[in-house]
Every structure is written in C-alpha cells, then in structure tokens.
Image (spheres, rainbow, N blue to C red):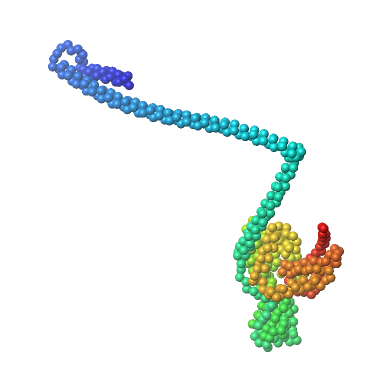
C-alpha cells in the first residue's frame, strides 16, 4: 500500500513540472526556467504557470486520495473475507475432530462387543460339548446316533405342525373361496338379469264363430288336408270350443301355420290355391324374421362374422321354449353371466361368449336324430367352428370331462340361468313326479339298492347290491334301465344312466 502511494506522489510531481513547461511555451513563446530579466510580462506568465501547477497538484492529490480510499476498502474487504474463511475452517476442523473422536469411541465399543461375543461363543461351544458328552454318557449313543434321533423327532414335530397349518389354511381358503364364488355368481347374475315373458308351446287360434270350422275343413276335407300337408302340422278343431289348436313338434312349423291361418281367416278365401300361396309367403316372412332375430342376438352378445346358416339357426330360438323359458332370452342371459364370471377370474371371455351363444344350437336341429349336445357339435364341426368352442358345447351338460376353464364356466352359466327362480315355469308337483318316475323305473330291476335322479333329471345314478349284480351284469343293467325310461317316460333332452357297484370288506379287531 505504501509503494502505491509513493508512485502516486512521484507521478504528481512529474505532472507539475510538465505543466510548468507547457505554460512557459504557451502561445508559441519559449521562456527559460530561470528568468534572466524581470519584467511585468514574465512575472504574469510565471504567476499563471504557478497557478496551473497548483491546480494540477490539487487534481493529482485528489486522484491519489480516491485511489488510496479504494485501495483501503479493497484491502478491508479482502481482510474480512480472509477472517470469515479462517472462522469456517476452524469450525470444520472442530467438527472433523469431533467426528474422529466419535469414530474412535465407536471403534472401541465395537472391539469390546466383538470380544464379548467371542467370549460368549466360546462359553456356548464349551457348554454344548459338555452337554453332548453328558448325553452320550447317559444314553450310550454316539454323536451321529443322537443327531439322527434328534432330527427324526424334529421332523415329526415339523410334520405335525405342517399338517396342522395346512389344514387351517385349507379351511380358511375354502371359506374365502366359497365367499368369493358367491360374490362372483351374484354379481354375474346381476349383470345377466333380464325380464321374462313366459310363453307356452301350445299354439291356439281363436275362431270368430263355429261356422268357420266348416270352411277350414272344406269340401271332403280338401282345405284342411292341403293346409296340413303344406305346413307340416296337425289341426285340432274339436278339442276346444271356439278355438283351433295347432300341433307340431317343430315350433317354426307351428308358427308358420299359426300366422298363415290367421291370414286366411282375415282374408276369407280359404281354398287350396290360396292356402298354398299364403303358406309360401309366410315361410319367406318367418325366415326373414328368424335371420333378423339371429343377427340381433349375435349383435347383442357381441359375436360377429358367423356363417349365415348358423345365424339363421340361432334365429329359430325365437320360437323355441324350454319349460316356458325362451331360448333367445336364455342364451342372452347365460352369455352375460358367463362373460361376467370369465372377466372376474381372468378366463378367455371371447371363448366363453361363443360357447354360451352356441351351446343349445342343437335344440333347433330337427331333421336328425340324437341329443341336442351331439347335434350341436356335429353342426358346428360342419361349419368348421373352432375346436375350443365345440368343446364348450360338447361339455356344457358334463357329458364328458371339462377340457378347459372356459368350458366349466359355460356349464356354470347354463345352470345359473336355467335353475334360477322364475326362469322356468315347470310346477313343483310335475317336477317331483318326473324325478320319482325316473327313480321308480330303475328301482323296478332286481339287485338295485338305491337310485338317485340328479341334474334336474338329466342323470340317474343306480347303486346295485354287489352280492347280487356282478361286474359283467352292470353294463346290461344300465342299458335295460335306459331302454325302460326311453319307452315309458317323457322328458326333455336325454337321461344318462350310471350304474355303480361297490364292494366293501370290513373286519373287527378284538
């Protein structure tokens, strides 16, 4: 700092000398520094030069003071920063020293703990050796033999505990599964709930008067004969006064006949040519209605691109009923239930949807013999439907074991839809009588011990006396019971007869 001030003073002196020289040369005149003669002009010049020199010196001193002030401020700032850094460094050093001290103390404690653990370990090992020697001396067993017995005992205890835990878990899981299954089924039924209008399979037409019956019959019965031949139904004009009953096993034929007769009665021209014309046009109308209904059913469940013939077959559900339950409504409800269950448990919802939609399609195949399950399977194979879907149809009445989870869901949804209260209109007395007749048919054979009709009459399980019926006779007995049921009883679909022969041997320990 002192060097800086000395330099400023020297510069100020030099500046003053140069200022004097500049004034002496003012206006192009040269004047000696040392005046040789004294006159008034020279004196004025000297005075002016001295004045300028003083001014320059004052400016230089002012500048030097400002520089000095700035230098002092800067020096003060640097000094303050240096002091702050020294303080921070001292704090950090103190913290570091404290950390080193704590680490040293922890290290000492750790060493002490390690020594203590090692001492305890040695004591335990010594105790273990002592106890082992005592046990060997008492039991006269070697170390390996004692270990083997101890492990066997330990394994038995673990097995008992494991079995107990497994039973407890099984009971808990079973309880949770039952509750979860109930929730799934209730939720699925809620999603699939539909309104039903119960209809019966009896087609009856109200006649305007009794005289119209003669016109329907026609001369020598030509009109009624033509109508029955072309429509494929039978007309009953005598069973009910004022009504005409149309009979046919095929609901589509019965619907065509009903609509045609209503048109003939409205038209009034009841004659063979007109009957043929009306029935032909009505068939075309009903086919269009069925295709529209089938297509609508497919769209409602979300299935597309089915062959047109299958869509037409699905449309026949409109005129097909099972115990008052319409097949379109049953299929729609079952599909909704099945899809809800599949979505809940993570199964293939699309496969379940197809299986539910097509599961009863065999019921509208009327030109072939067989169960509706087999007829449906054959029909779907004809149109090259996917094998997984066919399996769902083939297994929905448990005629064979389930091949997939989706097949079991289709079966469950079918049972839920068909068995829920209000779905079907068969009265309790008729149902009980049909079950009892099935059981009585099997009980009438010799050697039969117990009979149970199950699955709503779709299966009869027969338990025989093993000392009366041998293994070779069970197949013959099953066939004879099935034939008796087929000849004597009326039932929907098919009835499976299962004969079971059990041999039990028991002895008494005294």
Residue 256's quadrant in the figure? bottom right
Query: What's the residue at 66%, 78% (across, down)?
Result: 259
In the rendered image, the quadrant that contains the C terminus is bottom right
Residue 62's quadrant in the figure? top left
The number of callouts visible is 0
Give whichever of 106, 360 is nearer the camera: 106
Looking at the image, which residue sits at the far bottom?
Answer: 211
Relative image position of residue 507 (x, y in whole percent)? 83, 59
Looking at the image, which residue sits at the far top?
Answer: 36
Give whichever of 229, 277 is nearer the camera: 229
> Can residue 161 be seen?
yes
Query: What's the residue at 64%, 57% (across, down)?
Result: 176
Relative image position of residue 140 (x, y in whole percent)? 76, 38
In the rendered image, the quadrant that contains the N terminus is top left
Relative image position of residue 442 (x, y in whole percent)? 80, 71
Query: What's the residue at 55%, 32% (across, down)?
Result: 109
Relative image position of residue 230 (x, y in whole percent)? 73, 77
Looking at the image, which residue sits at the far left?
Answer: 40
Residue 275's quadrant in the figure? bottom right
Q: Is residue 464 above or below residue 4?
A: below
In this picture, residue 474 sits left or right of residue 261? right
Give whichever of 151, 429 is nearer the camera: 151
Q: Is residue 112 above or below residue 371?
A: above
């Amino acid at each position: 700092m002192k060097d800086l001030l000395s330099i400023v003073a020297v510069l100020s002196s030099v500046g003053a000398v140069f200022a004097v020289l500049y004034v002496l040369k003012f206006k192009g005149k040269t004047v000696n520094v040392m005046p040789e003669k004294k006159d008034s002009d020279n004196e004025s010049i000297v005075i002016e030069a001295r004045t300028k020199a003083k001014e320059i010196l004052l400016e230089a001193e002012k500048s030097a003071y400002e520089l000095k002030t700035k230098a002092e401020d800067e020096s003060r700032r640097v000094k303050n920063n240096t002091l702050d850094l020294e303080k921070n460094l001292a704090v950090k050093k103190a913290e570091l020293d404290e950390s080193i001290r704590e680490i040293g103390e922890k290290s000492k404690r750790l060493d002490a703990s390690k020594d203590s653990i090692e001492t305890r370990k040695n004591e335990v090992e010594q105790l273990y050796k002592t106890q082992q020697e005592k046990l060997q001396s008492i039991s006269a067993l070697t170390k390996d033999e004692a270990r083997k017995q101890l492990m066997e005992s330990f394994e038995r205890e673990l097995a008992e505990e494991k079995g107990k835990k497994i039973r407890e878990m099984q009971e808990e899981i079973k309880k949770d599964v039952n509750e979860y299954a109930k929730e799934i089924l209730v939720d699925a039924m809620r999603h699939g709930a539909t309104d039903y209008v119960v209809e019966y399979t009896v087609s009856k037409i109200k006649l305007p008067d009794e005289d119209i019956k003669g016109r329907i019959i026609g001369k020598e019965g030509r009109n009624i004969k033509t109508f029955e031949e072309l429509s494929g139904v039978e007309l009953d004009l005598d069973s009910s006064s004022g009504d005409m009953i149309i009979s046919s096993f095929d609901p589509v034929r019965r619907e065509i006949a009903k609509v045609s007769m209503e048109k003939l009665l409205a038209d009034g021209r009841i004659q063979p040519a007109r009957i043929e014309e009306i029935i032909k046009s009505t068939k075309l109308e009903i086919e269009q209605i069925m295709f529209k209904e089938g297509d609508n059913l497919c769209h409602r469940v979300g299935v597309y691109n089915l062959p047109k013939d299958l869509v037409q077959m699905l449309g026949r559900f409109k005129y097909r009923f099972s115990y008052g339950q319409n097949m379109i409504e049953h299929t729609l409800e079952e599909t909704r239930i099945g899809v809800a269950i599949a979505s809940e448990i993570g199964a293939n919802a699309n496969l379940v949807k197809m299986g539910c939609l097509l599961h009863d399609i065999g019921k509208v195949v009327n030109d072939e013999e067989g169960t509706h399950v087999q007829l449906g399977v054959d029909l779907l194979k004809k149109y090259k439907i996917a094998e997984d879907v066919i399996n769902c149809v083939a297994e929905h009445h448990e005629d064979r074991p389930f091949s997939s989870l989706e097949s079991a869901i289709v079966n469950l949804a079918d049972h839920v839809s068909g068995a829920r209260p209000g779905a079907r209109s068969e009265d309790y007395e008729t149902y009980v009588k049909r079950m009892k007749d099935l059981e009585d048919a099997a009980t009438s054979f010799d050697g039969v011990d117990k009979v149970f009709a199950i699955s709503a009459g779709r299966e009869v399980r027969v338990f025989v006396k093993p000392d009366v019926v041998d293994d070779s006779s069970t197949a013959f007995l099953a066939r004879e019971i099935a034939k008796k049921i087929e000849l004597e009883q009326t039932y929907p679909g098919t009835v499976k007869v299962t004969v079971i022969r059990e041999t039990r041997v028991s002895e008494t320990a005294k």
